[in-house]
Image: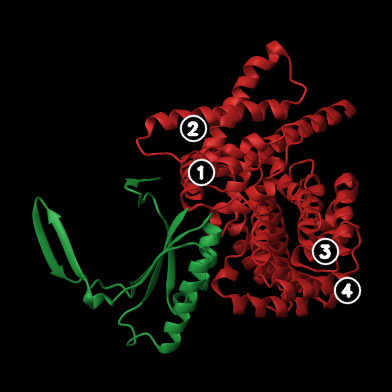
Amino acid sequence: MDTLTSNSSSARAAELAARDSYGRLLALLSAASHDVTAAEDALGDAFEQAVRTWPVQGVPATPDAWLLTVARNRLRDRWRAAEYRRTLALDPERDAPIHLDDVDVDAIPDRRLELMLVCAHPAIDRAMHTPLMLNTVLGFTAEQIGRAFSVPAATMATRLVRVKKRIRTTGIPFRLPDRDDLPPRMAAVLEAVYGAYVIDRTETGPEALHLAEVLAALVPDDPEARGLAALVQLSAARAVARTGPDGRFVPLADQDPARWDRRLIGRAHEHLRAAHTHGRLGRFQVEAAIQALHCTGSPEVRTLLDLHRILQDLAPSLGGGVALAAVTAEAEGPASGLARLDALMSEAGEAASRFQPARATRAHLLASLGRHDEAVAEYEQAIALTADSAERAHLRNLRAVEGSRHAARNQQGSYRGP
Amino acid sequence: MRYALLMHHHEPAEGELSAEAQRAFDVYAKALQQAGVLLAAEVLQPMDASTTVTNRDGAVQVQDGPFAATKEALAGVFLIDVPDLDAAIGWAGKCPGAQWGTMEIRPVATSFVDGGWTR
């Protein structure tokens, strides 16, 4: 068992290391050529050559430097070939990927922040920010990303090609924006990284979450980047415990804390401590604080309520509103929770009625108020909106319980007619 | 990179540019020039002054218009040479036209300079 665990964790470490070097090298090559597609092709060629020659000649002392040099030469070959093909005069000063010559391959600089800023640039369709990051920074294929976003692989591939072409033709720079522009640009980067946290990760695996760790390492002084990394890690730490041994969904309150990943929780707390030293509270830090409180096993419900209120003030959202209603129910009873939820739902209208957490929470609250028939109807709605099969099964069970309670009450003929 | 900053606004425009707007354009163009990025700055006559020309199979056709049903019309062109899109966005945002109309940023694909087409 131990060897199995250490094997799989070392395999995971190797995979992350490979993704790290892919992103670092691609960022470097793209920044120099301003052409992500050309950089990908060159890097792809370099990896191909590595697979051919390393088993024969041995792995070079600095694999990344080797890959960078080969890819750099590929880019240069491409450029030379283009020079012959072109009838237009080229300006060698402007057109040569000359900056690559300045790169000290022994101390490869990290340009992944610049690459992430390009991916989340306002001139790029917002819906493509996260896919582009997963593709360029972590090296996920269009097929994997397409599945995670429920989009056919060919469609995702076409979109990625189009958006990379756009980076080149519009002249989106691989540099940090001016000081005034940095805060909104960083906010977009955080949003895109958060996007990797909310997608269906059955296809991309936990590696998609690695984006948050990469970002926090690139901007250690950004408290929100730290907060986001903490949030992602706290959620990942409990991922295993969400599913029972029989594959069934286990809600947070019933999870076995022994199955949580203590190492990840520890890392998350390090991030949160580092973030709090800056004294600049933000949405992701509060969300992470809420998750951290849940990870204590017995969260103080008043503190939880305060945090949810702060979160709704900082960054109002439908999901945040539903969570606030649920915590209000815990702190002040199901009737006040339901009142808050119904107020939120009538305010949000159609969007809220199709929002699974809103319907599921409403069903739970109705059930705890003893309004069984209404609870059954509400569970039906929630089940119809639930994509996760384990969670759907869990909701079906609850609906069945409510259904039998309703029937039992009718038989007693207590306070409802036939 | 060369960019065309295309200024669009609602037509019919409310009369001539106000004295205040003219002053704003003056300040803007001088700032572009001082930064060494200005290639050309043109504010256009309204669309009712435009004429359309086509040449299909050697037949030159001239028409008044177009009076397309679009709400916004091209009202001016600023041609600039800056390092990248972020710089172009910076200048587009400073254009007085951005305050009442829309600035469209188009990268130049190729331009005729010193007797030849460049990239």
x, y percentage for residue B63?
A: 13, 68
Q: Which residue is mark 2?
A: A79
Q: Earlier in the sequence, mark 4 or mark 3?
A: 3
Q: Between label 4 and label 3, give the one nearer the viewer.
A: 3
Disc 1 residue crowd, few under 14, some 14–19, many 20+, Cα 10 Å: few
Q: Kindly state the secondary structure of the residue where label 2 is placed.
A: helix
Q: Which residue is mark 1?
A: A94
Read off the residue under disc 4.
A302
Give the mark nearer the N terminus: 3 vs 2: 2
Between marks 1 and 2, how big is the CA–CA gap?
12 Å
Question: The residue tagged with tag 1: helix, strand or loop?
Answer: helix
Task: Indicate the chain coloured green by its letter.
Answer: B
Vertical placement of residue A81 versus A331, above or below: above
Q: CA distance from mark 3 to mark 1?
A: 51 Å
> Which badge, 3 or 1, comes first in the chain's sequence?
1
Q: Chain of mark 1?
A: A
Against A65, is A372 above or below?
below
Residues under numbered marks 1 and 2 in contact, where contact means CB atoms less than 8 Å apart = no
